[in-house]
Image: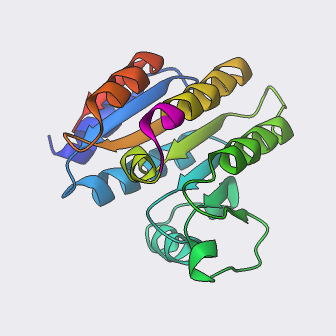
Amino acid sequence: MNDIERLEAELRNLPEDYIVLIETTAEKAFEISLAAIRFLANRNDTGIVISANRPYSNLVSIYNKNNIDLSKMFILDCISKNLNGQIDAPNVHFIENLSSLTDIALSVNERINQLRDDGIKKFVFFDSITTMLIHNKPYVFARFVHSILTKMRLRGVGGLLISLEDKTNKEIRAEIAQLCDKVIKI
């Protein structure tokens, strides 16, 4: 069984509202992230992607090439605004930068509130907590993640967080892992 099949098997049997930390290597991160978002898009009605690694235009291209339904996603692009690469699209919000944790939290909360219909299966996907941690003080970032995950739980929203093995601050990794329902190492 290859890594993608193993990941899908692990995720398939979990309840929809589970929050999962996926730890992987830098070499596998793109492939694992793509498989995870494909899984979420196929399983859920709608979701929020917090993009710390790729600008919106790049995500659109990658998702389209991989038959991932973008109409189901709202993307928080945390890097393009810094690069003056904004695009006018209904399913994207540009965040000033990765240090704008308050703006990210407000945007996630606002979007989750818009999805209040209990019959809708929802998700939040963090493409790289490791990258976000580089741009923020560890204790501030831990509070941010705790707040987001708590709101997700209160609203019955599942999610996946991608982290690079051995590259994430050990204390922060432990704090985030204890807030998740499962940790998967791929």
Residue found at x 43% / y 37%: 138
Name of the residue lying farthest toward the left: 1
How many numbered discs, if any? Answer: 0
Residue found at x 41% / y 50%: 128
- Residue 96 in magenta stretch: no
Image coordinates of residue 152 in percent, x first then y, are 65, 27
Q: Closer to the camera, 186 or 172?
A: 172
Q: Closer to the camera, 119 or 54?
A: 54
Where is 32 relative to 54, above or below?
A: above
Image side of residue 13 versus residue 1, left or right: right
Q: The C terminus lies in which quarter of the figure?
A: top left
Where is 78 relative to 32, above or below?
A: below
Can the viewer see residue 46 in this picture?
no
Q: The N terminus lies in which quarter of the figure?
A: top left
Can the viewer see residue 82 in this picture?
yes
Residue extent of the magenta highlight = 136-141
Image coordinates of residue 57 in percent, x first then y, are 57, 78
Image coordinates of residue 88 in percent, x first then y, are 77, 78
User: Hey, which quadrant is residue 184 in on the image?
Assistant: top left
